Amino acid sequence: MANLVTHPRTLFDKIWDAHVVQPLADGWDLLHIDRHLLHDLSGTAGLRELAERGLAVRNPELTFATPDHAVSSAPGRTGETFPGGAHLYRGLKELTRGSGIRLFDLGEPGQGIVHVMGPELGLVQPGMTLICGDSHTCTHGALGAIAFGVGSSELTHALASQTLVLRRPSTLRVWFDGMPGPGVEAKDLALAMIGQLGASAGNGHAVEYVGDAVSAMDIEQRMTLCNLSIELGARIGLVAPDDKTVAYLRDKPFGPKEEAFAQAAAHWQSLLGDPGARHAQEARVDVSVIAPTLTWGISPEHAMAVDGRVPHPADAAHTAQRQAWQSALDYMDLTPGLPLEGTRVDRVFIGSCTNSRLSDLRHAARLIGKRRVASHVRAWVVPGSENVKRAAQAEGLDQIFRAAGFEWREPGCSMCVAANGEQAAPGERVVSTSNRNFIGRQGPGVRTHLASPASAVAAALTGVISDPRNL
């Protein structure tokens, strides 16, 4: 069917059309899924449901698994260290073995947060479709793929059939105009975008990110940007593949080899939207005016410049927003009109599928110099994967963090969602490189400020929310 389409198509439409097994009624399609990633929460449950129904995994060779959500990140951990997740870990091991699915186990190269290990192993490639039972699967779109999180019923359906019944979303193109100033990172751009457009701007859309600032980003920065697509309300976010994409994927363990790689690279670089292709919505973000950005409230859209002042509910656009702002201020214990900078913090978390890659850790370590973590702050660094951990240790990054007073831990989701029992205490204020600052996300009563690795380091060293440009 795709060959019969003659009108200009977006990159998203080209990839989607290439995977339609059967068009259905009212905008629905039966879509083939190229890769399926499983973790210990949703993956274990999905495999168990499939077994209980007497169904087999349709294509185990296209499915890959790793424990990340419910395992401890404590040094020397095992799958039993966190008792509450031990049954999930054991279940994932047993069920993947019985299904013929490749499991990347604790301590093994390849283990890690699914949205870190997938790209680094070459499991996701341009033009693919990829799913996982996790909303931040949109991260993989940085490599020019359609990647999205699925619920439990969709996860089980895909395991059994390698397909999904889906309604084609509309498309939103976000232009990042201009170039960022010194000290402004991909995380700052993403938070500023959500603050400007709102957390529901992407509802019902697949988002394609374009512009000079996006082209200038390396692949891991693009992953940070695409990771936060779901916080814009979009299930899918993607960036068109280019020379950087090809270079990133060269020599990946599960990528094409030798002559096949050259052929694949030529195909990848042909994956562009057609001239004249129209998106349902367009939005523009002026990158040149963005400062280091953190959240002040309880939604990623509650974002502000580090050198700005906490907003006042009286300045909200409508009654519902005014009430939401007041509730957020009450929970976060912040006073409108006062600077955010200088607010005392208790904990700092550098990790999560948003900012735990090698480039994130390198940048954070460079900013430390010979400084030390403030005496009242507890600061963690949690690498995103076993491969990231080993590479960082080979470069001595772990020693830099340890010497400064950071705790260096084992790969996993850790404090991002606190599903493994790792959380802050009620009332504590955390500067976190993760992706959600919802009420209770990092523990009951915990106050979370989302930030870049640079802003997290600045907070750890000074003991207060600080402008990383001053480092």
Image (cartoon, rainbow, N blue to C red):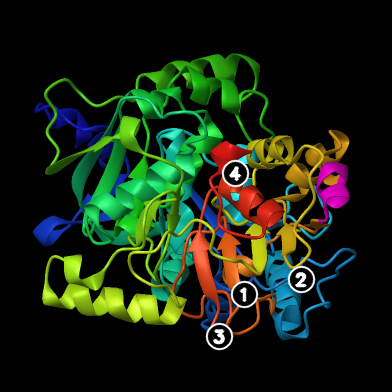
Name the amino acid, label 1.
Answer: Ala
Q: Quadrant of residue 167?
A: bottom left
Residue 451 location (% of width, % of height) = 51, 53
- For the residue pair 166 and 115, the one nearer the viewer reads as 115
Callout 2: 10 Å neighbours few (<14), some, many (20+)? many
The residue located at (50%, 63%) in the rendering is: 449
Total labels: the figure holds 4
Q: Tell me the distance, in whole angstroms, between the alpha carbons under discs 4 and 2.
A: 25 Å
Residue assigned mark 1: 418
Name the amino acid, label 4.
Answer: Ala
Which region is colored magenta? Answer: 399-405
The residue located at (76%, 76%) in the rendering is: 90
Name the amino acid, label 3.
Answer: Pro
The residue located at (47%, 54%) in the rendering is: 137
Give the foreground label among 4 and 1: 4
Give the foreground label among 2 and 3: 3
The quadrant the C terminus occupies is top right
Give the foreground label among 3 and 1: 3
Callout 3: 10 Å neighbours few (<14), some, many (20+)? some
Residue assigned mark 2: 72
The quadrant the N terminus occupies is top left
- For the residue pair 378 and 23, the one nearer the viewer reads as 378
Residue 368 location (% of width, % of height) = 74, 41
Q: Which numbered disc covers residue 51?
A: none
Q: Do labels 3 and 1 touch, CB within 8 Å?
A: no
Residue assigned mark 3: 444
